[in-house]
Amino acid sequence: MGAVSESRTVVAGAVIVNARLLLAQRAHPAELAGRWELPGGKVEPGEQDTTALVRELREELAIDVVVGDPVGADVDLGGGLVLRAYRVNVVSGTPAPLEHSALRWVDAAELHTIDLVAADRQWIPDLVALL
Ligand code: DCM
């Protein structure tokens, strides 16, 4: 029995290695398929953001990460969802697209040209500052 004002957080991870950012290509739903995002997913009720992001990146990319500082501002996705990004450092594994169509590493110039999902576009200046 949740309050009407309750919102659900979606966490996303900014993996940066050698001045390149890891992006993942969405496979679904149809309106987002083919567009690129910072990988992540929904925080479960009662779960911490950091725990959720570690879990999601293990499930989606087969990597273990340590979650760092937030990146940019929260983005209102509508429908009671709020999207939040964090820097993450890979501690083991090599990213593999277990749930995405593809992965790619982009530098700052490429980040401006890529077809990001709309919500993630708001972080471009913050991400460029980190690259
Ligand atoms: N989402 C997004 N940008 C991301 C990750 C997720 O806009 N980097 C959105 C897409 C969905 C919702 O969050 O509306 C839940 O994501 P998913 O379908 O991956 O669980």
Image: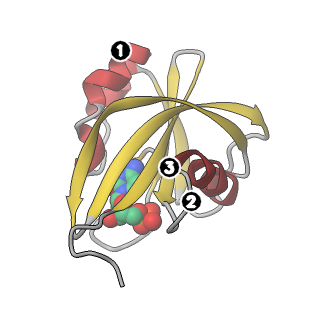
In the drawing, does residue 116 fall left or right of residue 12? left
Residue 39 tag number: 3
Q: In this view, does 130 lie above or below 119?
A: above
Query: Nearest the camera: 47 or 64?
Result: 47
User: Given the image, on which type of amino acid does mark 2 rest?
Assistant: Glu
Note whether ligand 1 is within 8 Å of mark 2. Answer: no
Q: What element carries label 1?
A: helix
In the drawing, does residue 100 fall left or right of residue 60? left
Q: Is residue 33 among what the camera can see? A: no
Mark found first going from the N terminus, 1 or 2: 2
Which residue position is annotated with label 2?
47
On the image, the x and y values in percent for residue 108 come to 37, 19
Which residue position is annotated with label 1?
129
Q: Is residue 78 among what the camera can see? A: yes
Note whether ligand 1 is within 8 Å of mark 3. Answer: yes
Q: Is mark 3 on a helix, strand or loop?
A: loop
User: Given the image, on which type of amino acid does mark 3 rest?
Assistant: Pro
The picture quadrant for ligand 1 comes to bottom left
Query: Nearest the camera: 68 or 25?
Result: 68
On the image, the x and y values in percent for residue 98 come to 65, 61
Residue found farthest to the bottom: 1
